[in-house]
Amino acid sequence: MPITPTTRPERRFWRDGLARVVGVDEVGVAPTCGAVVAAAVVMKPYCRLIPGVRDSKTLSPGQRERLAPMIRRRAVAVGVGAASVAEIDRLNIYHATHLAMRRAVARVGEHDHVLVDGLRIAEFEAHVGPYTAIVDGDARCYSIACASVVAKVVRDRMMAKLAARYPGYGWERNSGYATREHRAAIRANGLTPFHRRSFPALQALVAGDQGTLDELFGIDLDEGAVQAEAEAMVAAEVDFPENGEPEPELESGRRFPTLVLAPG
């Protein structure tokens, strides 16, 4: 039975008068293509929980699609950030993931505290302010679970859109994971601009190093399960902002695009 998240982590801060507590989670670390996406969600203090919200990995595509708009309607603020494939290849997936999280937090505006899924992150506090890392936070913490649902829906919609531009790789079914179908398409058609070329698994695949490939990929993913992941995905209203809104600035002063979660 999946764990049902609670607001116990948030209540610790709400009791101290910190109303804008942000839950943050990311998706898309393991796939071999596409951006890594993070979401940040602020819920009202002592809010009524939305039935069914939990770690997005334990939900069906249909459940996530039903819950995501409910989360967005009830939230005080929702921010979505991404790190592109070029940034993943330049920074590595670890740093790119944290960049996506920082962008998501920046999108919610002023906040009092951040709750993030996972372990402590080096120098994260310098960018987002006071934060608490919660192991298995997407399963245990309500606002992080909400963020995990939003992030998963956004990323799967993005991959479905990319699948229409690059047919044959099965991204509408596998969300970019290295399924047998996906790997066969890479062998037949090569890499697209949206493949993470820095990933050793892709390098081995392109080079035809089957021994390294088996070691890196391990057991094949369940194709049926991956198909189920994409069944309910619809076209996303997700674009890079063109409305003049300021973007979060990095140490170098360079500005990067941040995904905006469109209403509806």
Image: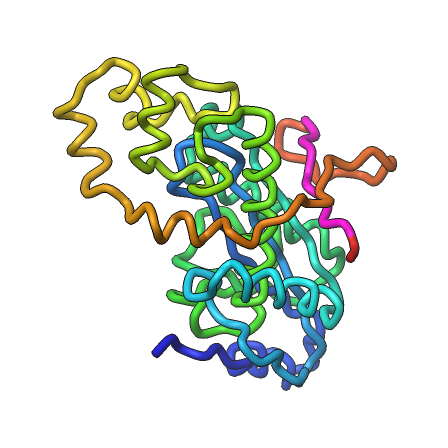
Which residue is at a point 83% across and 40% down the rendered structure image? Answer: 245
Q: Is residue 237 left or right of residue 204?
A: right
From this view, report whether residue 225 is shown above or below residue 11: above
Which residue is at a point 51% across and 51% down the rendered structure image? Answer: 231
In the rendered structure, does residue 256 fall within the stretch colored magenta? yes
User: Percent position (x, y) of residue 179?
Assistant: 33, 37
Res 246 quadrant in image: top right
From this view, report whether residue 109 is shown above or below residue 87: below
Which residue is at a point 54% across and 66% down the rendered structure image? Answer: 63
User: Percent position (x, y) of residue 228?
Assistant: 43, 54
Which residue is at a point 50% across and 61% down the rendered structure image? Answer: 116
Q: Is residue 89 left or right of residue 149?
A: left
> What span is in magenta?
254-262
Q: Does the rendering let one see residue 263?
A: yes
From this view, report whether residue 80 is shown above or below residue 46: above
Quadrant of the drawing holding the N terminus: bottom left
Q: Does the rendering let one see residue 126?
A: no
Res 162 quadrant in image: top right
User: Percent position (x, y) of residue 42?
Assistant: 68, 67
Q: Is residue 107 left or right of residue 223?
A: right
